[in-house]
């Protein structure tokens, strides 16, 4: 379990202990939602401004949890969170159900838009020679075989490192007009790898662990022209009595994952 997961789990235990027998399902939902949001946030982005992810993921989860906590139990909140995360990442609709209570739900994209803007990205100065325009990805990938990491998008750039087969790294984006991908460690860009040697990381590979400590060396901030996608997701919940509840959440791509925004 990652450190952030341990801290979040501890916060859940402490909250439940402090609230004791007077904890309502709505309050429970806020706590559970906060933990779920934080865990998802640790996988899908970094917080800034009003956006909610990583550390802000706790706030995002608490917000959703408090709204839905009066209707959904812990299992259902987690199912809804997972379905939403899947729809955000893939653009495909998802469904879930709880046979024990009869509650069910679905998530679907109701709005999707792309935009190109300049984003600020920390880069390891001694390794990254250039920062070309990117199509943002912000997903964990694994090396399909041993491969060199280059200082730019091409074999004519110097070798600045390597990846082992199965090693999991964050792919910040694909260089426009090519199949070279900029990778990062600890939120800092560290070089480029060709797409022939990368594939989305499996749950097994993720469970094996990911080294994501911020690398040593001088770091500078680069302004990168990046194309990103934002998606608004409709969450529909049908309770056991047939009552339907609806909410929405918006998420936008960043170099290090998806950031959730208040809607």
Image: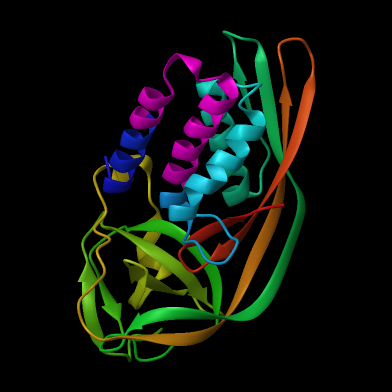
Looking at the image, residue 187 lies above or below residue 100: below
User: Is 32 on the left or on the right of 18, as rendered?
Assistant: right
Q: How is the image coloured?
A: rainbow
Q: Nearer the viewer, residue 127 or 24?
A: 24
Q: Nearer the viewer, residue 102 or 133?
A: 102
User: Is 78 on the left or on the right of 183, as rendered?
Assistant: right
Looking at the image, residue 19 lies above or below residue 159: above
The residue located at (71%, 68%) in the rendering is 114
How many numbered marks are there?
0
Q: Position of residue 72 (x, y in %)?
A: 61, 22
Q: Position of residue 20 (x, y in %)?
A: 41, 18
Indicate whether residue 80 is drawn in magenta: no
What is the quadrant of the N terminus in the image? top left
Q: Quadrant of residue 130?
A: bottom left
Q: Is residue 195 visible?
A: yes
Type of secondary structure dominating the magenta stretch: helix
User: Is 212 on the left or on the right of 194, as rendered?
Assistant: left
Q: Is residue 132 visible?
A: no
Q: Position of residue 117 (x, y in %)?
A: 64, 80
The residue located at (53%, 47%) in the rendering is 59
The residue located at (58%, 63%) in the rendering is 253
Q: Quadrant of residue 217?
A: bottom left
Q: Which residues are magenta?
A: 13-40
Indicate whether residue 17 is drawn in magenta: yes
Looking at the image, residue 144 lies above or below residue 8: below
Looking at the image, residue 254 lies above or below residue 79: below
Q: Position of residue 243 (x, y in %)?
A: 79, 18
Q: Nearer the viewer, residue 37 or 119?
A: 37
């Amino acid at each position: 379990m990652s450190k952030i997961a341990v801290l979040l789990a501890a916060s859940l235990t402490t909250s439940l202990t402090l609230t004791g027998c007077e904890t309502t399902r709505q309050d429970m939902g806020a706590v559970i939602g906060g933990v779920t949001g934080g865990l998802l946030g640790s996988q899908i982005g970094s917080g800034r401004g009003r956006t909610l992810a990583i550390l802000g993921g706790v706030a995002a989860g608490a917000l959703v949890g408090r709204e839905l906590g009066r209707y959904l139990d812990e299992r259902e909140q987690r199912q809804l969170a997972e379905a939403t995360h899947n729809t955000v990442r893939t653009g495909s609709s998802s469904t879930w159900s709880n046979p024990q209570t009869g509650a069910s739900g679905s998530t679907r994209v109701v709005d999707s838009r792309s935009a190109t803007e300049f984003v600020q990205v920390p880069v390891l100065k001694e390794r990254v020679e250039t920062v070309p325009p990117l199509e943002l990805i912000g997903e964990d990938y694994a090396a399909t075989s041993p491969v060199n990491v280059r200082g730019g998008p091409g074999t004519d750039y110097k070798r600045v490192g390597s990846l082992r087969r199965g090693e999991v790294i964050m792919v910040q984006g694909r260089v426009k007009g090519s199949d070279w991908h900029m990778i990062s460690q600890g939120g800092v860009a560290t070089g480029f790898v060709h797409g022939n040697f990368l594939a989305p990381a499996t749950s097994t590979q993720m469970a094996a662990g990911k080294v994501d400590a911020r690398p040593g060396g001088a770091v500078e901030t680069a302004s990168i022209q990046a194309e990103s996608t934002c998606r608004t997701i409709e969450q529909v919940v049908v309770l056991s009595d047939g009552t339907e509840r609806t909410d929405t959440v918006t998420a936008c791509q960043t170099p290090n994952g998806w950031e959730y925004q208040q809607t």
